Image: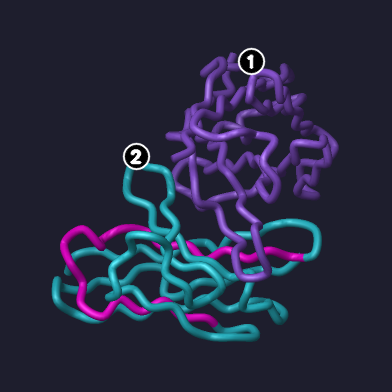
Amino acid sequence: EIVLTQSPGTLSLSPGERATLSCRASQSVSSNFLAWYQQKPGQAPRLLIYAASGRATGIPDRFRGSGSGTDFTLTISRLEPEDFAVYYCQQYGASFVTFGGGTKVEIK
Amino acid sequence: QVQLQESGPRLVKPSQTLSLTCSVSGGSIRSHGYYWTWIRQLPGKGLEWIGYIYYNGSTSYTPSLKSRVSISVDTSKNQFSLNLTSVTAADTAVYYCARDTRLSAYQYFFDSWGQGTLVTVSS
């Protein structure tokens, strides 16, 4: 089973600042099978990024995904008030799916 | 745009079976390339993939729940269902149904989700 470790657990930033979220895999993951989701309280997760760097429909270009192998990054270039949420990375393994533990981006 | 909606009992007694159904609208559950999935979120925790079913009945489950879980599909009703047996308080969670899209080598993602339903295991 591939374990995804996200860091930091919590990121305290101000609107307008840049957020850099890390997702590290316990073994190499195909970039095609790495996605990022945003979840706000009381809501279902929303797809942001697929195939490590592809933006989902309707996702603003301030969200950027990058990385390969075991290290992946989600960057939010300038935080908007609606971006404060929890972010999860997710991968497709040979047999099943795993999610990272999440990074909470909170208002400083 | 496809929409998913979970339904089922919100309270289940320990040792009993948790049963949920996901109704799919705005698209056919028989469409190729879509895997119909259950994901749960324990209170205050992250997301846990439970498993999926394809329209032809093919399934895959997470190893930690494999002995207790089954997912079935009813294509005539455009629904799929989750059964989790011998539940304990540790199975209390928000249960989501979701569409797992795998249309090409570069298109693997969960792009449609139900709103989620909190199921509490308690006597």
Could you say which disc has been placed on residue B13 in the image?
1
Number of numbered labels in the structure image: 2
A25 is higher (above) or lower (below) than B25: below
Could you say which disc has been placed on residue A42 in the image?
2
Callout 1 amino acid:
Lys
| Residue segment shown in magenta | A72-93
Q: For this rendering, which residue is in front, A24 or A30? A: A30
Rendered image coloring scheme: by chain
Q: Tag 1, which chain?
A: B
Which image quadrant is residue B51 in? Answer: top right
The quarter of the picture where the N terminus of chain B appears is top left
Callout 2 amino acid:
Gly
Q: Position of residue A83 (x, y in %)?
A: 25, 62
**Disc 2, SS:** loop
Colour chain B appears in: purple
A83 is higher (above) or lower (below) than A74: above
